[in-house]
Amino acid sequence: MPMPHTMQPIGIIHSCFKEKFGIPRQAGLAPDARATLELLPPYNRPEALTGLDGFSHVWLLFIFHGNQKPQNKQRKNWKPTVRPPRLGGNKRLGVFATRSTYRPNSVGLSAVELTGYGQEHGKLVLHLRGVDLLDGTPIIDIKPYLPYSDSIPTATGGFAPSAPSQSMTVEFTPSAEAVCQEIEQAIYPNFRRLVSQILKDDPRPAYYGTKPQKNRFGIKLLDFDLQWQIEGIEGNDGNKIMVLDVKRIET
Ligand code: SAM
């Protein structure tokens, strides 16, 4: 048996996603989802990033810390088969054939856009876009994305051959729209675009399809709680999402 290897996070993610519900199912699906990656001591040495100029994307290796369980229950944190949401949640596939967050070593892998990096307020940070990462995610490594080798145009995608269909139309009530405009001016450019990118892919778990009575949901984004509901358009049930309300979360 090879020796177990202990790893120490090299950084931590500060992301717009404050809870798992609503995070895109893969990196790049919501290009306006921004995060900063703060490098932690002793890895916060500017020379550790020398040469990163010119790379538009990086790979992040991280820990699915939001799934971690107490030490005595960790063996139960994975199963050899999982139910990918992509297949409606009712078919089991091998964990190593999926990108499930429940896996033996809880390691995740995302290719994200790098928009800048440098020293800010005494911290060494990387600015990222298109993230699918929960706030507080521990990062265990960063590697540059190498288009000549990492992009494989002839690759086939198994049970997930293309991006999920963008089936939902997203609209805002006038009051939600007004709050979003304020957020865009003061805190987060393109906030409405981000909300639309998240909701158009329908973040509801697959099993909600069998619970049509529940149609009102909430998502926490930045310091805001977004309330939204499923509605029908043009005689079709359930293909419109209406953002009803956007409220600052009181701490
Ligand atoms: N791109 C990564 C991969 O393939 O390893 C992640 C894919 S995983 C299917 C994406 C989901 O992971 C998100 O929708 C979110 O719910 C969940 N997630 C993101 N960060 C997490 C964290 N730190 N802990 C637990 N779950 C997380």
Image (cartoon, helix red, strand yellow):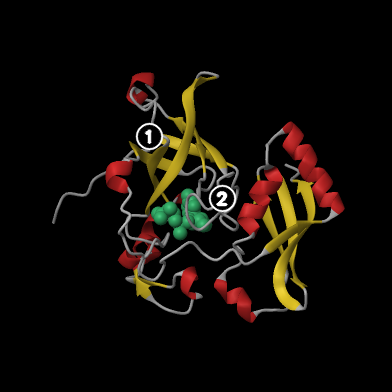
Please report contact status of discs 2 and 1: CB closer than 8 Å, yes or no.
Answer: no
Q: Which residue is mark 2?
A: 30
Q: Is residue 97 left or right of residue 201?
A: left
Question: Residue at the right extreme?
Answer: 174
Amino acid on which the number 2 mark rests in the picture: Ala
For image coordinates 33% across by 55% down, the residue present is 153
Residue 145 visible in this rendered orientation of the protein: yes
Residue 105: give x, y in percent of width and height. Answer: 32, 55
For image coordinates 56% across by 54% down, the residue present is 23
Residue 46: give x, y in percent of width and height. Answer: 38, 20
In the depicted structure, whether residue 241 falls above or below residue 54? below
Residue 114: give x, y in percent of width and height. Answer: 46, 35
Quadrant of image for the C terminus: top right
In the depicted structure, whether residue 182 falls above or below residue 24? above
Residue 247: give x, y in percent of width and height. Answer: 78, 48
Q: Which residue is mark 1?
A: 10
